[in-house]
Amino acid sequence: VNSTLPATVIWQQGQLQLLDQRRLPEQISYLEINTLAQACEAIRTLAVRGAPAIGIAAAYAMAVVAGGVAEARRLAELEAAAQALQAARPTAVNLSWAVQRMLRLARSDIRLERLRAEAEAIHDEDRSLCRAIGVNGQHLITPGCRVLTHCNAGALAVSELGTATAPLYLAHAAGVEFRVFADETRPLLQGARLTAWELAQAGIDVTLICDSMAATLMAQGEIDMVIVGTDRVTRNGDVVNKIGTLNLAVLCHHYQLPFYVACPSSTFDAQTPSGAAVHIEQRPASEVLDGRAAQVKALNPAFDVTPAALVTGLITDRGLLRYADANPLAPLLDAATQTSRS
Ligand code: MRU
C-alpha cells in the first residue's frame, strides 16, 4: 500500500539496521546496530521511534546482544540488556513488552536461533496487527470525510500500514476519497516530517496544520473525526500518547466529534490501573527552545494522558471497541492473558 516508504527496521542474517528518522524526510539513511549501547542510543534519541517500532527494534537488539556472547553467559547479559533497553524510553509499553517477551523465552531456551526467531515473530505479528486494525477501522473512513491525526502513528512508527494510518491506507486502496489533516506536533515535528510525508508518498490527500489550528478547523466544521495512535492504554482505558493528544480529545468533546485511538494489543497495559501511574518521559528543554534564548526555561513532557471518558473507542486488532459498550476492553484483557501465558 505504501511500498515507496523506506523500511523502519531491517533485519538480514542477524544484522540490524534502523532507519534514522531524525533525518527524515530530507535524508534516508540507516544506522547499523551492533551493540547494546548503539541500540539504546538509537531509541533514546528517537532515531527509531513510535511505540511498536521501538519494541521491534529492542527485540532485535536483544538478538544482537545474544549473538555477541557465549551461551553460558547469555542469560545474564540479556537480563542486563533488558534493563538498559527499557530505561531508554519509559512511556511506551511496547518496549518493555517486547523485551520481557524475549527474556521469557531466553529463560527457557537460550539458543541463538530461537531468540532470533522470536524477534522476527514480534516483527511479523506487528504487521498482521496493523492490518487487522486497518480492517477493523476502514469503515470509519467514508467518502468525503476529514480526519485529523497527531504525531506519527504510521508505517514509520510501526511496520507496513501503521496503526492510526492503517484504516486510511486501506480506505485509500479501496478508492475512497477523503482528506487528512496532520498536526505538525511540536517540538520534534513527527507530524510535519513523518506523517505528512508518508501519507503524501502514498498519494493520500494530506494537509499540514500547526498544532494550534485544530480548534479553529473544528469550529469551522472542517473536521469529522480524530484518529491517533498510542504508546500505552491502561487497564481503565486511559490513553497515553504524544503531548497534544489530550488537547484534541478535549476539543472533540467540545465539538462533539469522535475521538478514536488505534491500539494494537501489544500497546494495551493490563498491569497498570490508570494513566496516573504511567511514567511520562521528560525530554530535554533544548528540543523546545530549538536554539533560542538559552536562559529561558522550557518544559518538555513527551506524552500526555487522555482520560477514558474522552475516548470514543479503540480501533484494535480485536475489533472496534466502543467505550460506550459494556466491558469494552474485554477483548484486550483476553489478549493480554494469552500473551503472558505464551
Ligand atoms: O516520541 P515518539 O515519536 O516515539 O512518539 C510516538 C507517538 O506518540 C505515537 O503516536 C505512538 O507511539 C503510536 S505509534 C503507532
Image (cartoon, helix red, strand yellow):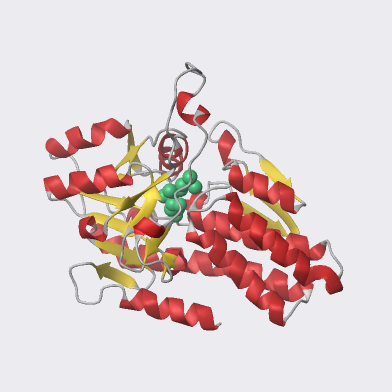
Quarter that holds the N terminus: bottom left
Quarter of the image where one finds residue 288: top left
Residue nearest the viewer, comparing 63 with 121: 63
Quarter of the image where one finds residue 230: bottom left
Question: How many circles with numbers are drawn on the protein?
Answer: 0
Figure check: 5 above or below 239: above
- Is residue 173 among the parts visible in the rendering? no
Figure check: 86 above or below 339: above
Residue nearest the viewer, comparing 284 with 124: 284
Residue 154 location in percent, x, y?
44, 50
Residue nearest the viewer, comparing 149 with 303: 303
Figure check: 246 above or below 235: above
Residue nearest the viewer, comparing 273 with 262: 273
Residue 319 location in percent, x, y?
32, 72
Quarter of the image where one finds residue 195: top left
Residue 59 location in percent, x, y?
64, 63
Residue 259 location in percent, x, y?
24, 54
- Is residue 70 among the parts visible in the rendering? yes
Figure check: 324 above or below 2: below
Q: Residue at x 77, y 64 (%)?
A: 77
Quarter that holds the C terminus: bottom right
Q: Is residue 34 left or right of residue 54?
A: right
